[in-house]
Amino acid sequence: MEYLVIAVVVLLLALGTALLVARRRRTALPPSEQPGAVEAPAAERPATAEVPPAVTVPPAVEAPPAIEVPPAIEVPEPTAGRLVRLRAKLARSQNALGRGLLAVLSRDHLDDDSWDEIEESLIGADVGVEATGQIVTKLRERTRIQGTRTATELRTMLADELIAALDPGMDRSLAATPKDGKPAVILVVGVNGAGKTTTCGKIARVLVADGHTVVLGAADTFRAAAADQLATWGSRVGASVVRGPEGGDPAAVAFDAVRRGTEDGVDTVLIDTAGRLQNKIGLMDELGKVKRVVEKHGPVGETLLILDATTGQNGLEQARVFTEVCDVTGVVLTKLDGTAKGGIVIAVQRKLGIPVKLVGLGEGPDDLAPFEPEAFVNALLGDA
């Protein structure tokens, strides 16, 4: 009996051990190898997360500093004969003053009404009453004595009288040559709206075109854009610009410009002043101060008055007051291409005894020409 119980116990132990081993084997095998397991299709298998390879980021490289390229220096053509090249821009004045007069003079019979018509044309072109009277008197006398009637002869007579009225003997050269080791100083003055700063930049181009070295003085400290505008003009032709703080003392800027010009050994210092109304006493006094301060370095060789040709006879009053304050030596007549009143050139010179030295005939950088009376009259009269 005891042996039977022992045998049953041993058998139970053996069966338990076998079951335990079988269970452990099923746990150790992968699911696909377990008995009765069916492998799932690849599309249904859970995705295995892949670890991307490590990316090596190169060290940051500093960009090279930007190289500022200076603007190309322009070399304007010499100004000789520039007025002839720009003659087409005088079309409006030509129609009114030239062709209109020739049309009347070419009539078969010139009576008093015809001569009155000629007078009206000249006065309407701002030649001035006194100058008009003298021109008409001489023309009447010449046509009476010579009895000429051909278009060519009449054109020649009219041209002679207009050239004489412009006084071709006046000195129209710019005082831009240094003396005694000091640069020539040119002061540019004018009223608001005459295009003074732009014209100042164009004058610099005229000087450079004729072989001068230039320093620009931005003494218009009251208009924020004036100094920047002048600097742009100067950079095109390689002229340096001396400027001061906005609202600063214009006389101090002018003084520094002349000193810079002396140190750099340039030929000409061109000083742009603030636009002034001729009836503002304080501003005109300040302009006189600018000139006095500049003259501590040496005399001002030239004072150029910028006049807008479209203002007509009003420009004469401007010229008169400026002359009293700062001794104007020459006139720059701008916007002559935009007016039929080309006779203002004659009126300015006869009234004030001041030569017109430069004329503006357009908005281009080189549309400023030295004034030549004969070329101007021929452009007005055209090819008739």
Image (cartoon, rainbow, N blue to C red):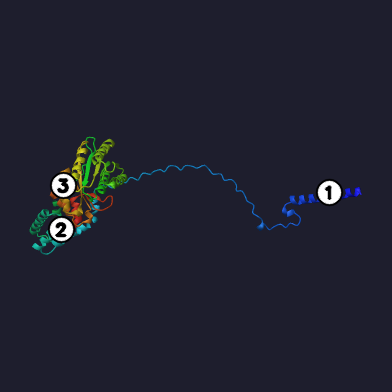
* In the depicted structure, whether residue 155 falls above or below residue 227: below
| Rendering coords of residue 2 (x, y %) | 91, 48
Question: Around disc 2, counting alpha carbons within 10 Å, would you say few (fewer than 14), some (14 to 19), or many (20 or more)?
Answer: some
Q: What residue type is labelled 3?
A: Val
Q: Do the residues labelled 1 and 3 touch (CB within 8 Å)?
A: no
Quarter of image, res 381: bottom left
| Element on which disc 3 rests | helix
Quarter of image, res 72: top left
**Left/right of residue 364 with respect to residue 164 in the rendered view:** right
- Residue at image coords 84%, 50%: 12
Camera-side mark, 3 or 2: 3
Let me know if residue 13 appears in the view: yes
Camera-side mark, 1 or 2: 1
| Rendering coords of residue 264 (x, y %) | 28, 37
Rounded to the nearest angstrom, the CA distance separating label 3 from label 2 is 24 Å
**Which residue carries the number 3 mark?**
321
**Which residue carries the number 2 mark?**
124
**Which residue carries the number 1 mark?**
13
Q: What residue type is labelled 1?
A: Leu
| Rendering coords of residue 349 (x, y %) | 15, 49
Going from N to C along the chain, the mark reached first, 1 or 3, is: 1
* In the depicted structure, whether residue 178 falls above or below residue 157: above
Going from N to C along the chain, the mark reached first, 3 or 2, is: 2
Question: Around disc 3, counting alpha carbons within 10 Å, would you say few (fewer than 14), some (14 to 19), or many (20 or more)?
Answer: some
Closest to the observer, 5 or 381: 5
| Element on which disc 2 rests | helix
Can you name the residue that lies furthest to the right here? 1
Closest to the observer, 130 or 271: 271
Q: Do the residues labelled 1 and 2 touch (CB within 8 Å)?
A: no
